[in-house]
Amino acid sequence: MGRVIAIANQKGGVGKTTTSINLSACLAEAGKKVLVIDTDPQGNTTSGLGLDKDSIDNTIYELIRNECTIKQCMCKVDNIENITVIPSTVELAGAEIDLIGLPEREYILKNAVDYIRDDYDFIIIDCPPSLNMITVNAMTTADTVLVPIQCEYYALEGIAQLLHTIDLVQERLNPRLQIEGVVFTMYDARTNLSSDVVDAVKENLNATVYNTIIPRNVRLAEAPSHGLPINLYDAKSSGAESYRNLAKEIIGRKDL
């Protein structure tokens, strides 16, 4: 059965989509079969993996509206072996209204994913930067939640709210949900602030903190504009090595 990881943090700009793209690509590089589900209306994970959003007929939005099956909205990525994507476009922003009043609306994504879960080693869900019904759907589908935290002053802002949401979902909707852990992003070794943030989070959060820390890296920032994950855009960059190490850590987890 595939392991489903939701990558969530309602604070924007923390490296959530960067982590979704590059962790998925490095898991695939390690020989794992990966499904990436983009649930962010911005669709940056979709374009960051090289898909043209304008040429896609069926997306996560049509799936949620029951206008297609989950297999009908899957897209293969031409230049990346072992990765399939369920894409997103800006239309998804209207899904919250479409879901009003629907029975079992918290489980729409889970019910769809259950059909294909056994076909993949990992299913990575890129969540929107908000705690809405789409995020709740991602968390009812997931086994674990991976939280990227930016190494900057406001790193802990909103984390308490996210953890509270995870607790509520676990209590009321998905008893098996766990916190996968925390991964630090945009780390700048030249500043004291980055190391101070890491220390503060380790002291204040009762969660696994991955040893891998993702550095602030120009090549990581450039890769999405080319529609490539970092391991294909610049395989020898520090960003690529870091995401490979994170993939190895996640594959090696035996306690989940």
Image (tube, helix red, strand yellow):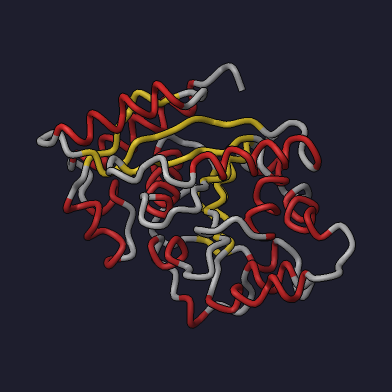
Q: Residue furthest left?
A: 190
Residue at 77 percent of width and 35 percent of height? 171
Whether residue 36 is situated above or below residue 64 in the rendered picture? above
Q: Residue furthest bottom?
A: 54
Whether residue 203 is situated above or below residue 192 in the rendered picture? above
**Residue 75, how many percent across, how many down?**
56, 64
Q: Quick check: 111 left or right of 42?
A: right
**Residue 30, how many percent across, how many down?**
42, 34
Residue at 70 percent of width and 74 percent of height? 62
Q: Quick check: 112 left or right of 49?
A: right
Q: Quick check: 151 left or right of 66?
A: left
**Image quadrant where residue 79 sits:** bottom left
**Residue 162, how many percent across, how many down?**
56, 44
Residue at 44 percent of width and 69 percent of height? 51
Whether residue 3 is situated above or below residue 204 in the rendered picture? below
Work out whether residue 210 or residue 228 is closer to the camera in this orientation and state it.
210
Q: Quadrant of the C terminus?
A: top right
Q: Quadrant of the N terminus?
A: top right
Work out whether residue 84 or residue 128 is closer to the camera in this orientation and state it.
128
**Residue 253, how many percent across, how many down?**
52, 21
Whether residue 90 is situated above or below residue 215 in the rendered picture? below
Q: Residue furthest top?
A: 254
